[in-house]
């Protein structure tokens, strides 16, 4: 069998091209896996950030509601104190005859 340089060069070129293609394909698969992993990480971070923001807004709303409820409790206490003072003033005025008791009863009816 005679050595044919054309066939040998073709085989070497084919092996070189095939190995280059395999290396390129392996690199592409690795790159695609890295991109998929990065995309999954971004999606997970986005979901966590959205959940954190939602929980922050929820806690903020709860704190506002508690503040309003506490404010109304304070107003109710003030109104109760004022009603007691008004009753004391009325009783004082009735006791010392500044306002007759009959006029108060007419106004209440």
Image (tube, rainbow, N blue to C red):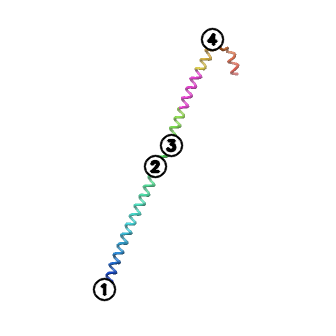
Question: Residue 61, percent across and down?
Answer: 52, 40
Viewed as shown, does residue 55 lie left or right of 10? right
Task: Check disc 3 and report the residue beneath it.
Answer: 58
C-alpha span from label 1 to label 3: 80 Å
The correct choice, above or below, for 19 with respect to 101 in the image is: below
Sequence order check: which comes first, mark 2 or mark 4?
2
Task: Check disc 1 and report the residue beneath it.
Answer: 4
- Would you identify the image quadrant in which residue 41 lies? bottom left
- Would you identify the image quadrant in which residue 27 lies? bottom left
Task: Check disc 2 and report the residue beneath it.
Answer: 49
Question: Residue 94, percent across and down?
Answer: 64, 14
Q: Do the residues labelled 1 and 3 touch (CB within 8 Å)?
A: no
Question: Residue 3, percent across and down?
Answer: 29, 86
C-alpha span from label 4 to label 1: 137 Å
Q: Is residue 65 magenta?
A: no
The correct choice, above or below, for 51 with respect to 30 in the image is: above
Helix, strand or loop for disc 3: helix
| Residue at left offset 50%, top offset 40% | 60
C-alpha span from label 2 to label 4: 70 Å
Residue at the outermost top position: 96
Viewed as shown, does residue 35 lie left or right of 73? left
Which labelled disc corresponds to residue 96?
4
C-alpha span from label 4 to label 3: 57 Å
Sequence order check: which comes first, mark 1 or mark 3?
1
| Residue at left offset 63%, top offset 11% | 96
Q: Do the residues labelled 4 and 1 touch (CB within 8 Å)?
A: no
Sequence order check: which comes first, mark 4 or mark 1?
1
Numbered range of the magenta stretch: 71-84
Helix, strand or loop for disc 4: loop
C-alpha span from label 2 to label 1: 67 Å
């Amino acid at each position: 069998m005679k050595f044919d340089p054309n066939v040998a060069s073709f085989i070497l070129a084919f092996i070189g091209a095939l190995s280059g293609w395999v290396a390129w394909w392996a690199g592409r698969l690795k790159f695609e896996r890295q991109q998929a992993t990065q995309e999954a990480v971004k999606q997970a971070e986005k979901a966590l950030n959205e959940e954190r923001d939602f929980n922050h807004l929820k806690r903020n709303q709860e704190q506002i509601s508690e503040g309003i409820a506490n404010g109304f409790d304070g107003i109710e206490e003030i109104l109760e104190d004022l009603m007691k003072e008004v009753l004391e003033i009325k009783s004082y005025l009735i006791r010392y005859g500044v306002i007759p008791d009959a006029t108060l009863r007419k106004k209440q009816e």
